[in-house]
Amino acid sequence: MEITWWGHATCTVEDSGTRLLTDPVLVRRLAHLRRRKGALPPATALRVDGVLVSHLHSDHLHVPSLARLAPGTPLLLPRGARRSVPGLGRRLRHLEITEVAAGDEVRLGKLTVRAVPARHDGRRLPVGPQRSPALGYVVSGQARTYFAGDTGLFEDMAKEAGPVDVALLPVGGWGPGLGHEHLNAERAARALSEIGPRCAVPVHYGTYWPIGMAGVRPHEFHTPGEEFVRQAARIAPEVSVHLLGHGESVRPEVAR
């Protein structure tokens, strides 16, 4: 069982001989955001048995990155994605797209993937009707891995995730401020205390930042991972936290 963090919310989860990729964003620039840290994932990162997309924001559902996947790659999207994102079905017609909602389960290789709720605006744009939910995913194989996507704390978070071994939790963002529908380092540590995984990997920080704003609250770019380690040691000391650099991997110890 191995986790690789490529930056932002993009991770490879390898379990039971099956490789999954989360929220792939494989570009140096995304609209007003620039990749300020970490090399782009290599082409080998695209050789996977399935891809999980948590919600429709363009830093999570990035169509040009998804278009690079091999024909026939299974892709899980929140229900309503093809209706909400113009041209998505046409540009990704080479992929096996399945739209899911919270509670749905899909088999990918030797893994079972269950969609779970997230507290986050799932719309493609910050206007218009809410047609697609924001999701997290629990991947079950040798281990149970919870990829939270992008979310704030919510009351039934631990209940919805269920017992998990590994938690991939967002601890920051791509700008100098975070709303209540995001986890910062302290809220992510509180989530750890509630979920109770054996170990955790912080994600969704220290990769993209608005162009021209390098000097605006730079600690919000550089420090969330280390702050999460500190907060987790205080709030959830029983959880092992693996602080990865871009492109680094860890093989967490999990119950057998």
Image (cartoon, grey):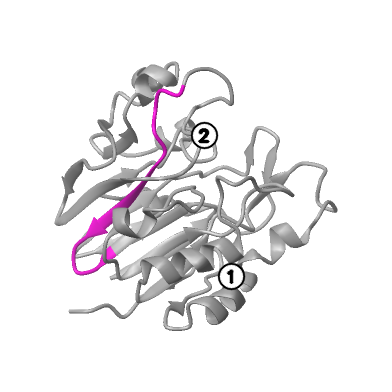
Q: Which residues are magenta?
A: 130-144
Whether residue 131 can be seen here: yes
**Residue 33 occupies which quadrant of the picture?**
top right
Instruction: Tally the marks.
Output: 2
* Residue drawn at x 31%, y 29% as measured from the top left: 79
Q: Which disc is residue 198 wearing?
A: none
Q: Is residue 98 above or below residue 169?
A: above
Check disc 2 and report the residue beneath it: 57
Query: Which badge, 1 or 2, comes first in the chain's sequence?
Result: 2
**Residue 44 occupies which quadrant of the picture?**
bottom left
Q: Quadrant of the N terminus?
A: bottom left
Q: Is residue 64 above or below residue 138?
A: above
Given the image, on which type of amino acid does mark 2 rest?
His
* Residue drawn at x 52%, y 34% as measured from the top left: 57
Left or right for 151, reference 116: right
In the displayed image of the protein, which residue is found farthest to the front? Answer: 155
Asked if marks 1 and 2 touch (Cβ < 8 Å), the reply is no
Check disc 1 and report the residue beneath it: 228
**Residue 59 occupies which quadrant of the picture?**
top right
Q: Is residue 135 magenta?
A: yes
